Amino acid sequence: MDKIEISEVYRAARVLKDVVRHPHLIAAPRITDRCQLYLKPENLQYTGSFKLRGAYYKISQLSDEEKARGVIACSAGNHAQGVAFGATHNGIRSLICLPEGAPLSKVEATKGYGAEVCLVPGVYDDAYRRAVELQKEHGYTFVHPFDDPLVIAGQGTIGLEILEEMPDVDAVIVPVGGGGLASGVAFAIKSLSPGVKVYGVQAEGAPSMAQSVADGKIERLDSVQTIADGIAVKEPGVNTFEMCSRWVDDIVTVTDDEIAAAILALIEQQKLVAEGAGAVAVAAAMFGKVPVDGKKVVALVSGGNIDVTILSRVITRGLTKSGRNCIVTVDLSDRPGQLAAVCGVIGSLGANIISVTHERTAGSKQINGCTLRIVMETRNEEHIEHIKQGLAQAGYTVL
């Protein structure tokens, strides 16, 4: 790869100084008591994501001839908006290839920043192949979302800002998709403060970089499946694989349920809206995926461009994961008063019933029986267990 010097990251910082926002760290003591957690809220960035940094810096370094031909990019959504913003800001034409399943909010926002959009069936990797084809056909300059030294340098400016604001930080947790963000942040931080730990986090359903680093070679996944669409990458880049292998201390994974719980925690505790990819670093801190107990830690909230329809479903998943929603199925005799009695027990134990489904089915263990499927609002997992014990003590069978 083209070697990146720390001077390139500083040069990017100068270019971006009056272009991007520089969100300050936010203390987040209520999200977890495992560590002293702080957030770097790049979801508050122009375009709603850190991607603006790398995309803008790359475009700013193009020659006049390259600018005249225009630029093309592929993206799950956030890089698209960064390229569109950067190109329009510099008076350059931009064409963006997005996966067909990209959230509608990201598609419309990309158009709103002045780009032409080409929707491609499949995931990010499919959009990438189409973008390469179009680049060769029309002579556009390709702005890679992560595997480009200038893009990586732009993302590395986040590392500079973290160290400037918190020079005594012990660890930084960074989302990982293709690896551009982790490469830039880890390189910048390790170049200036080698003792700071940098941990990468991927979605369990898209662990391409984690698997590649573990195997010591680039691996391509057959498929990816996660609510964190922004990091749903089948194969890491050549440059980013090399840099993550060298500079990132470890890469862990989090489940979709853990991501949903982190999104919910950010909304409730910090009044911040994060997309799935943006919340994975917080999820890793919340669920003890990285060894940071008692340490001063910065989790990077990389983006907040989440579709409102997806957000609704994610909140529901997050409530269930955190024990705030619960579904209990009770087997009981089908006779008058039973429904009221069961609801009375649950109400007396402090739960709020949302819905009840009464079924006379073969699911009951009794010939003259029925099942009740009760959806309720609860406080936490301990409260749920207390309710189940209360129903059992009252003589009801919880399936």
Image: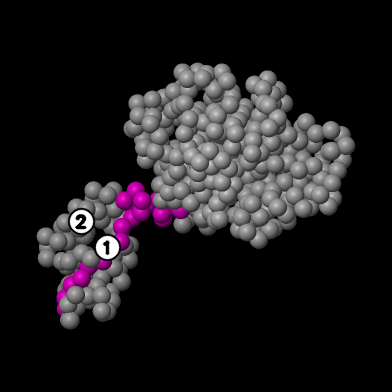
Q: Are marks 1 and 2 in contact (CB under 8 Å)?
A: yes
Residue 262 picture location, percent across and down: 43, 43
How many angstroms separate mark 1 from mark 2 (CA)?
A: 9 Å
Would residue 30 appear left or right of 90 to someone viewing this image? left
Seen at 40% across and 34% down, the residue is: 290
Considering the numbered disc 2 on the image, is that residue within a helix, a strand or a loop?
helix
Q: Quadrant of the C terminus?
A: bottom left
Q: Quadrant of the N terminus?
A: top right
Which dot marks residue 328?
1
Q: Is 322 covered by the magenta stretch?
A: yes
Against 104, residue 38 (above or below) is: above
Question: Please, what is the three-letter code of the amino acid marked with disc 1?
Answer: Val
| Residue 47 appears in the figure | no
Seen at 31% across and 57% down, the residue is: 326
Specify start and end residues of the magenta stretch as a single range.
314-336
Would residue 160 appear left or right of 298 to someone viewing this image? right
Residue 131 picture location, percent across and down: 74, 51
Considering the numbered disc 1 on the image, is that residue within a helix, a strand or a loop?
strand
Residue 381 picture location, percent across and down: 27, 49
The residue to which callout 2 is attached is: 387
Q: Nearer the viewer, residue 305 or 207?
A: 207
